[in-house]
Image (cartoon, rainbow, N blue to C red):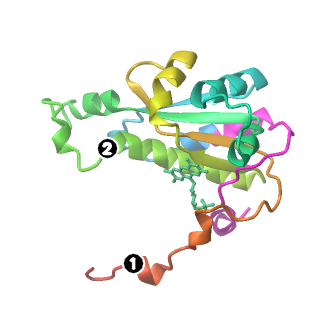
Amino acid sequence: MEFAEVVRRRRMVRSYTDAPVDREIVDRALANATRAPSAGFSQGWGFLVLDTPDDVRRYWAATTDGADEPDTWLRGMRRAPVVIVPCSSKTAYLSRYAEPDKGWTDRDESRWPVPFWHMDAAMASLLILQTAVDEGLGACFFGIPPDRIAAFKAEFGVPEEYTPIGAITVGHRIEDTGPDGSVARGRRPAEEVVHRGGW
Ligand SMILES: Cc1cc2nc3c(=O)[nH]c(=O)nc-3n(C[C@H](O)[C@H](O)[C@H](O)COP(=O)(O)O)c2cc1C
């Protein structure tokens, strides 16, 4: 698919068929993720891949309240055969920037204009979303509730220094489930958000 087409077609997909996803596609998405830029080439990311029915079930059990009556969002998302959890390590960035070529040996976090560790994992996440579109699949990036993060990390043995920045479902999309609440807001046009030569 043309790059412009991938960009134009990408939408968060929240409802999936039961069809499995080829392992090679997931591997391609992850390989593309590792092509993302990273501050100081730190690459302080890690991607937890859950691609068996049992692992996916464990994901949802750890991150939701297990209600008997899941809402439409959860029913649709839970059918996705693959969940990828991009994680970031602040420690990796503080250590990388303490190296001689950077020299931030005090590891002072106030040196960082924004948390580059999360940014880099987010850039990698977009490449996963775009790869899914390129392969004719759907994907959705979504947040993990803060009060579920400890349970999620314990369930999957995620090392202490890694923080999940969210999660990504991947699967075969159910066509045309209509726009969700946020999309109804409409896309802000470039003229409104671009400030050329001054704000
Ligand atoms: C950081 C981030 C967090 C998001 N969290 C959620 C979420 O928790 N649940 C959800 O359904 N969608 C989530 N989304 C998807 C947005 O709602 C979606 O990107 C937005 O409405 C624009 O729609 P589009 O991506 O389909 O163009 C998130 C997107 C981003 C970038």
Q: Nearer the viewer, residue 63 or 198?
A: 63
SS at mark 1?
A: loop
Residue 37 visible within the image: yes
Q: Does the residue labelled 1 lie within 8 Å of ligand 1?
A: no
Q: Mark 1 points at which residue?
A: 194
- Amino acid type at image mark 1: Val
Q: Position of residue 4 (x, y in %)?
A: 64, 69
Residue denoted by label 2: 115
Q: How crowded is mark 1: few (under 14 residues within 10 Å), some or many (20 or more)?
A: few
Q: What is the magenta range?
A: 1-29
Q: Quadrant of residue 68?
A: top right
Q: Is residue 90 above or below residue 71?
A: above
Q: Position of residue 97 (x, y in %)?
A: 24, 35
Q: Looking at the rendering, which quadrant does residue 171 occupy?
A: top right
Which residue is located at x 84 percent, y 36 percent?
Answer: 20
Q: Is mark 2 on a helix, strand or loop?
A: loop
Residue at the image position 40 percent from the left and 19 percent from the top: 160
Does the magenta-highlighted stretch encompass residue 4? yes
User: Tag 2: residue type?
Assistant: Pro
Residue drawn 54% across and 24% down? 152
Residue 149 versus residue 127 in the image, above or below: above
Looking at the figure, which quarter contains the C terminus? Answer: bottom left
Q: Where is residue 33 in the image (x, y as percent from the top left)?
A: 56, 42
* Residue 136 drawn at (x, y percent): 78, 54
- Per the model, the C-alpha gap separating discs 2 and 1 is 23 Å
Residues 41 and 168: in front is 168
Q: Tell me: residue 83, above or below residue 7.
A: above
